[in-house]
Image: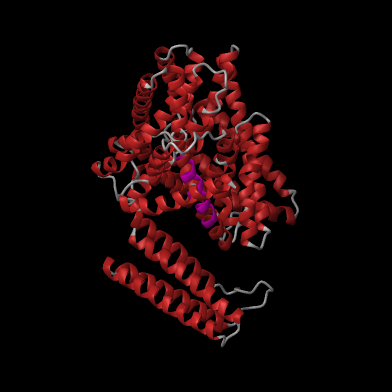
Amino acid sequence: METLLIAVASAVVVIAVTALAPRAGVAAPLLLVLIGVGVSFVPAIPAIEIDPEVILAGVLPALLYASAASFPSMDFRRDFTAIGGMSVLLVVLSAAVMGFVFAWVIPGVDLAAGIALGAIVSPTDAVATSIIKKLGAPQRVVVMLDGEGLLNDATSLVLLRSAIAATAASVSFWGVVGDFAQAVLVAVVFGLVVGWVGLLVRKHLEHAALSTAVSFVVPFAAYLPAEALEASGIVASVAAGLVTSAGSARFLRPQDRVAEHSNWRTIETLLEGGLFLAMGLQVFGLVEEVRAEHGSLWLAFGVATLGAVGVVVVRALFVLPLLRYLARKRERAGHLRSTVERNQQVVAAKLEAFADADGVLTPDAAFAMARSMRDDAARLPGGPRGRRGRGDAARQRRRMEAARRRKDSLTEEQRERQRSRMTARAAEFRRRFTRRLADVDYLLAAPLGPREGVVLVWAGMRGVVTLAAAQTLPPDFPQRSLLILVAVGVAVGTLLVQGGTLPWVVRRLGLAGVPSPRLEEGTAGLREIVDGTAGRMLTEPGLSRPDGSPYAPYVIERVRDVVLRDQHDQDEEEAASHDLQAQFFELRLAVITAQRAALLEARALGKYDSALLQRSLDLLDAEQMAVEMRGHHTGD
């Protein structure tokens, strides 16, 4: 009963603080930490200590899975180099540098124990991302911080495990590298498999509640077997979440995605808030333990201050060359764009020239196109020349002749399959060029300069993972209570100082409310895709129902009218001023509210069938969700 009472009281505090924090202009996690610290010093409240396994195995897999499941996989691929550097190399560098510092300043702590503490204070917390998202900071900065937070926890925990082992026995550098690579690779395999299986299972479930229930199981189904094989369960959970992010739109129904998002958002709010509250509640017990062992807190305070400053300095020294590398990459992308675009035009012209009247690339045309492109390449500067070039051309010619002879012996069915493969290959070729150009445009449109670098550095605050990792230190670890208090000091200090000043820093740098540079272009392009797809489908001559029968002309015209009307309504909304748009959505919501009130009155009178009334209410709910989403997007 006492445990249940504490859980309910904590949930009430988290809900109240999360609701009131925006009015105070302070991030909710910061207030929850302060409340926890204050409550921990109340004499009537006993010292609280939470089993770290509850956090590491019971909470983190779920939270990181939820973050990964909502993380854009396309952006993760584009900034994978920077994300990987910040979540792996930066953590290793921070652990090593701070390990030397801690071993130097803390009595009785050797290098292995110092690196263990360095690994504990190296991972950043996702609270920074939530702060800068609300401020409207550049999307690429948000992506990099989000991606870093997904993976650096695993790097830290693997390093911590190796450092703890090194305090009891000697370990080699390459042994640590091998353990890390094995832990990551095995975890990625488990995560990918579990994430894929989870999507396949949910695809065949027709109830949104069951689909969401499966999503609750997925992170732990990935975590547990990975940990059993001494791999990183955290990485496995993140990998499963990224698979879900990439495949949810293809495999899941809209109801499943809405229910999953809503339920996971509730769980994230309660768990994250509970972790920060618990973080503050444990401070008093740690303070008393260190005071009993050392008689003073000055050593812990000094080392924690040094650690908090040190991790920021190391982060700044890492981010500076990273920004230079990304700037050079962007410059190379600018030079590469014209080359890629020119090659795309050449290939598109060749495909168009050699395709048949239906736009299909026949085997004969494919051979002819390959010969033409080979001849063009031979005439280009730097193309195959001399004896070696002639030899290459001769080999290519022999291969093509052999392929032609094989083609002549094919049956008509085999020819058709080959034709389909070549058509698909040509389409894939176009897709690759298009994606490459889009990646280049992304780098050119979202540069990372000194201002973004300052945000990346200052947003590197520590949090609950640092506290949970510190408590996994063995009971006989050198200076255990002191090291845990130092870790808590670093986490609380960076949360309060950096987290409390981060909004001011972002606004001061002029990065608050920065719209995407490709917003208008992207909005118009997506509208064109959606509208064009609808128009082409509705004008197809062979448009038919799933059973093969044709649609009635009246139905086709009716759907076309609805689609065109929605397009016209959206065009009018976008053309109106911001004030008129706000009035428009306000009035639409007021009308829906009045309609709902009338339906509820009819239900109270019992004049209509309950199933019909519920269906009408559900339709109003769906309409209100659509209006609110469009109104929220316009308000942003």
Q: Residue at x 57, y 29 (%)?
A: 391
Residue 124, picture quadrant: top left
Q: Residue furthest front?
A: 44
Q: Residue at x 56, y 33 (%)?
A: 52
Q: Residue at x 55, y 52 (%)?
A: 427
Give the percent coordinates (x, y) of residue 135.
32, 49
Q: Residue furthest bottom?
A: 607
Q: Main secondary structure of the magenta part?
A: helix
Q: In the drawing, does residue 606 fall left or right of residue 90? A: right
Nearer the observer, 247 or 179: 179
Q: Tell me if residue 522 comes above or below residue 229 in the rendering.
A: below
Give the percent coordinates (x, y) of residue 278.
48, 39
Give the percent coordinates (x, y) of residue 337.
38, 42
Q: Where does the magenta region start and end?
A: 262-276
Residue 174, picture quadrant: top right
Nearer the observer, 316 or 121: 121
